[in-house]
Image: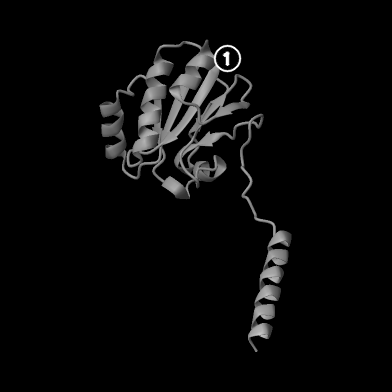
Amino acid sequence: MIKSVKWFFVVLVIGSLISLSFSKESIPAEKLKLGDAAPQLMLCDSVQLLDLHDAREGYTLLSFWASYDAASREKNAALAHLADKHSQIKMISVSFDRYVSVFNATVKQDGLLKNDCYVETDGSDSEIFRAYDLERGFKNYLIDSRGIIVAKNVTATELASYLN
């Protein structure tokens, strides 16, 4: 009886290993990759389009953040202060705060008054949230003058090296 249980266990383990070797783990594909054209920005489902091709000979840095997400807020502020010092980069900052009053207070507190800052009050229900693949966290995109994504999730240090 114990011998048959032992063989049953061996067959079960081998069967499990074989079935695992045939299963393919599904890794979700990125919606936007380097070299892709950046989707147009339309905020709050209105006709307010933001021009991503306005950087002429430089870059546009498109940064997504929210006041409730400390990491994205800190990264956005650092990038904005660096972008203020360089004429070859235009920064567009989009917050996903539900309340405009919270957005306005955060912009003032973080010293972002010189930048193009916008708020998307529809949050994760907005088209821009889905178009820029923000389901897995806030990101930023560096876009060239032709509207092509040349870098994603750049830090202030990486941005400084692009500009030099």
Q: In this view, does 42 lie to the left or right of 71?
A: right
The image shows residue 35 at horizontal and vertical percentages of: 66, 29
Q: Residue at x 71, y 70 (%)?
A: 15
Q: Residues within 10 Å of mark 1 (few under 14, many from 20)?
A: some
Q: Can residue 53 be seen in this view?
A: yes
Q: Is residue 115 visible?
A: no
Q: Residue furthest bottom?
A: 1
Quadrant of residue 53 within the rendered picture: top right
Name the image colouring: one colour
The image shows residue 19 at horizontal and vertical percentages of: 71, 66
The image shows residue 57 at horizontal and vertical percentages of: 58, 12
Near-viewer residue (25 or 43):
25
Which element carries disc 1, helix, strand or loop?
A: loop
Quadrant of residue 5 within the rendered picture: bottom right
- Amino acid identity at mark 1: Arg
Q: How many labels does the image show?
A: 1
**Up-down: is 20 above or below 30?**
below
Q: Which residue is drawn at 50% across and 43% down?
A: 134
Q: Residue at x 33, y 24 (%)?
A: 112
The image shows residue 92 at horizontal and vertical percentages of: 46, 26
Quadrant of residue 162 within the rendered picture: top right
**Up-down: is 30 above or below 40?**
below
Q: Mark 1 points at which residue?
A: 56
**Up-down: is 60 above or below 102?**
above
Q: Residue at x 53, y 34 (%)?
A: 41
Near-viewer residue (11 or 47):
11
Of the 4 image quadrants, the one containing the N terminus is bottom right
